[in-house]
Image (cartoon, coloured by chain):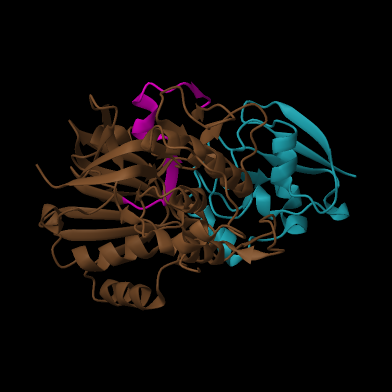
Chain colours: A brown, B cyan
Amino acid sequence: MSDVIETDVVIIGAGPVGLFAVFELGLFDMKCHLVDILDRPGGQCTELYPEKPIYDIPAWPSILAQDLVDKLLEQIEPFKPTYSFNRMIAGIEQLEDGRFRLSTDDQEVIEAKVVVIAAGGGSFQPKRPPIPGIEAFENESVFYSVRRMEAFRGEDVLIVGGGDSALDWTLNLQPLARSLTLVHRRPEFRAAPDSVNKMYALQEMKKLDFEVGQVTALKGDGGKLQSATVKGPNGEVEVPCTRLLPFFGLTMKLGPISDWGLELKDNLVVVDTEKFETTRPGIFAIGDINWYPGKLKLILSGFHEAALMAQAAKRIVSPGERVVFQYTTSSTNLQKKLGVA
Amino acid sequence: MTKLTYIAFDGTRFDVDASDGSTVMENAIRNDVPGIDAECGGACACATCHVYVDEAWTDVVGEPEAMEEDMLDFAYDVRPNSRLSCQIKVRPELDGLTVSVPERQG
């Protein structure tokens, strides 16, 4: 078994609310480990709208989403949180001593006294394109990411999309594939111009095909893909293919958390408004992922929830210890933790 | 107030009064028009408020900007009259605008 990461609190989701929870928990000397399916902290702020201004963060008349994340990272720096990126929590079990053992999809094991779900809209997962019957070909002929390039050697590869993933894999797989076709809805791309130019150059040399259009149907048998119908401005064409890589961006799904036996309401985790604890003691939920009467999906509500959750988490992490409420403005003790006194 | 009409995928018609400056997406959500998900809340960061603008209105409504075109790549069954409703601001010239909701969002 791989090394076990031991921590006081494991936070699922490194968005703004998960990050601020590190601060509130840190003030009470709790060590945090964050797990996120993305490759960096920031959640939706970083992934969806880094350059959009947010106008309802207290004391910030306007702040860009990425700047908010950067400020939060600076604020929690004294508490030295640790991270597992590109990971999704796959399983959870409760140990005899009351602690939780969580495993990620990469077999990483984390043991913590408290679990905080701060997963926002859920985990980001590749969007399944709306092509009828695509499920039947998944993991056999249809893949949403390239784990091993060798799996595409000698195959007739069809890539759909117009962003960097689509263009990068077009360029990387072209030398290996028997044939490669790129399909995109329009001749303009979102990808880096350099990649687009390279793609067009390969098309000139007849080393790949580029079709403008949308995939409307798949043909094949027993999970093995044979061809795809591409509907373009000049009608339909049938593109022979044995591998399909659709890049349609990311969507958010609640994921495995839905199997943890927590009370849910419309795919949100039900919590109380004193501790923001779920129906399983020791597991908390804060931010957009939770529900309680009057819930507003605002970052500032998540911050408030993090502060109250931390009080309750402390009682679990350090049972019997008195939880003293202090202000960062006047408490030397807190200021020491923040490295300012 | 500007009058907007939404045609849901099942054909149900929703006539709403919209205030100028609000978006076509916001009015759909406020009036419970089915089929508009607006996952990102209007940041032009998903493609789940996709609508078809009635052909008679496409010129008045106008073309999507580059960022919206990029997001439309993620929508389902994109047509020349496709728009993301969060990017259409209600204004007096749009009085009577009709949009239809696609079979599903991306």
Is residue A236 in view?
yes
Position of B3 with respect to B66 (left or right) is right
* Depicted A288 relative to depicted A198: above or below: above
Q: Is residue A198 above or below residue A14?
A: below
Specify the quadrant of the image occupied by residue B35. Answer: top right
Query: How many labels, in total?
Result: 0
Task: Estimate the x, y position of residue A202 in percent, counting from the top left.
Answer: 26, 74
Asked whether, in this view, residue A325 is left or right of residue B21, the answer is: left
Determine the residue positioned at 27% across, 27% down: A94
The part of the image, by quadrant, that contains residue A330 is: bottom right
Does residue A220 appear left or right of residue A266 in this picture?
A: left
Q: Residue at the spot x=42%, y=37% of the render?
A: A321
Q: Position of residue A121 (x, y in %)?
A: 49, 41
- Whole-percent x, y for residue A337 in the image: 45, 60
Of residue B56 and residue B14, the one placed in the foreground of this image is B14
- Residue A126: tell me if it is visible: no
| Residue found at the far right of this picture | B1
Q: Residue at x 35, y 25 (%)?
A: A260
Tell which of A309 and A189 is nearer to you: A309
The residue nearer to you, when weighing A120 against A202, is A120
Query: In the image, residue A150 lies at what x, y percent?
Result: 10, 57
Q: Nearer the viewer, residue A3 or A163?
A: A3
| Magenta span includes A250 | yes
- Quadrant into which the N terminus of chain B falls: top right
Q: Which residues are magenta?
A: A246-266
* Residue A207 is covered by the magenta coloring: no
